[in-house]
Amino acid sequence: MITGTSTAQAIATGVSDELDEPLVDLEDDGTAVTGDGVTVEADDRIVVIGSTTTARAHLELMELQERANAFDPGEVVTVIPYLGYARQDKLFEPGQAISARAVARAINASTDRVYSVNPHNISVLDYFDVPSAPIDAAPQLAEPLPEDLVDPVFLGPDEDAEWLANSVRDTYGDGHVENFDKIRHSATEVEMTAEGKDFSGSDVVLVDDMIATGGTMSEAVNILDNQDTGRVYVTCIHPLLVENALSRLHRAGVQSLYATDTIDRSISQVSAAEPIADALAE
Ligand code: R5P
């Protein structure tokens, strides 16, 4: 059976549909509620799904794991569509904490297995003591693209995003893959270089793992503005969209913007439910 926190309602529903497993609410009184009055059997697997977008969301996931364990099921599997705090995966300054390790340790305590959709850096999964695996939702980002892209370029705004662009291109089935180079000056400001890269005449699909402040994608779109490109699509797995990210992208001239539902936002046009269900079905 499947249950989701408030940050994963759409995706939990999608996974339940894909797997044809009941979607339940785990109540305070220890009952699992569905329209069909499902009861939890001793060898059942409970899949707990929650995106840890905020500290509150992280706590909510741990509380739901706790409730799942109270049923003493056969297995508790935790699926984290968006794993927050993952960018703090090492010590950048003395005195800081490795937040990614801290949250992994907390999540470990109440689960038998963990899946995370496109974690910022796959090495953060090493912080989990229980078995863990990544799920790749990048192929879903090819779905909304029109079939008639002209000489398409799948473009990562930095080197780390190139493999995601490659994954989208492979699913689309045509085009080539490129990346810009990025230097981050602060949490909101980035500098991007595109020496020798001119995509005039091509339709461009920009692909990144997440959009947070929108600084990275705005900078990439600014560069493309100075080239005679065709249509430009801006897409990512995790639409975190903090502060004024949407208006910042709008001001940069972004017209076509979409993401997956690992974080439920207005631009969450495609669902990561299918690759999650595939992983759970293995
Ligand atoms: C950075 O390494 C990530 O892949 C993203 O490019 C970054 O997190 C996007 O953040 P922002 O939207 O704030 O530039």
Image (cartoon, rainbow, N blue to C red):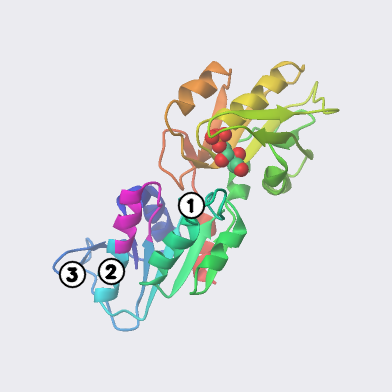
Q: Which of marks 2 and 1 is in front?
A: 1
> Looking at the rendering, in which quadrant would you find the N terminus?
bottom left
Looking at the picture, how far across and down is residue 249, in whole percent? 54, 23
In this view, which residue lies farthest toward the left?
A: 29
Report the residue marked by disc 2: 66
Residue occupying the point 52% across, 66% down = 127
Looking at the picture, how far across and down is residue 49, in whole percent? 39, 59
Residue occupying the point 24% across, 70% down = 38
Q: Quadrant of ligand 1?
A: top right
Q: How crowded is mark 2: few (under 14 residues within 10 Å), some or many (20 or more)?
A: some
Tag 1 secondary structure: loop
Residue occupying the point 60% across, 25% down = 218
Horizontally, is 110 left or right of 236 in the view? left
Q: Which of marks 3 and 1 is in front?
A: 1
Disc marking residue 31: 3
Please state which amino acid type lies under the numbered disc 2. Glu
Report the residue marked by disc 1: 96
Ligand 1 within 8 Å of disc 1? The answer is no
Please state which amino acid type lies under the numbered disc 1. Gln
In this view, which residue lies farthest toward the front?
A: 94
Instruction: Give the mark nearest the N terminus, 3 or 1.
Output: 3
Q: Is residue 125 magenta?
A: no
User: From mark 2 to mark 3, how far is it between C-alphas?
Assistant: 13 Å
Q: Residues within 10 Å of mark 3 (few under 14, many from 20)?
A: some
Q: How crowded is mark 1: few (under 14 residues within 10 Å), some or many (20 or more)?
A: few
Tag 2 secondary structure: helix
Magenta part of the chain: 49-62
User: From mark 2 to mark 1, how far is it between C-alphas?
Assistant: 29 Å
> Looking at the rendering, in which quadrant would you find the C terminus?
bottom right
Is 85 rendered above or below residue 21? Answer: above
Q: In the image shown, does 118 or 150 lie closer to the viewer? A: 118
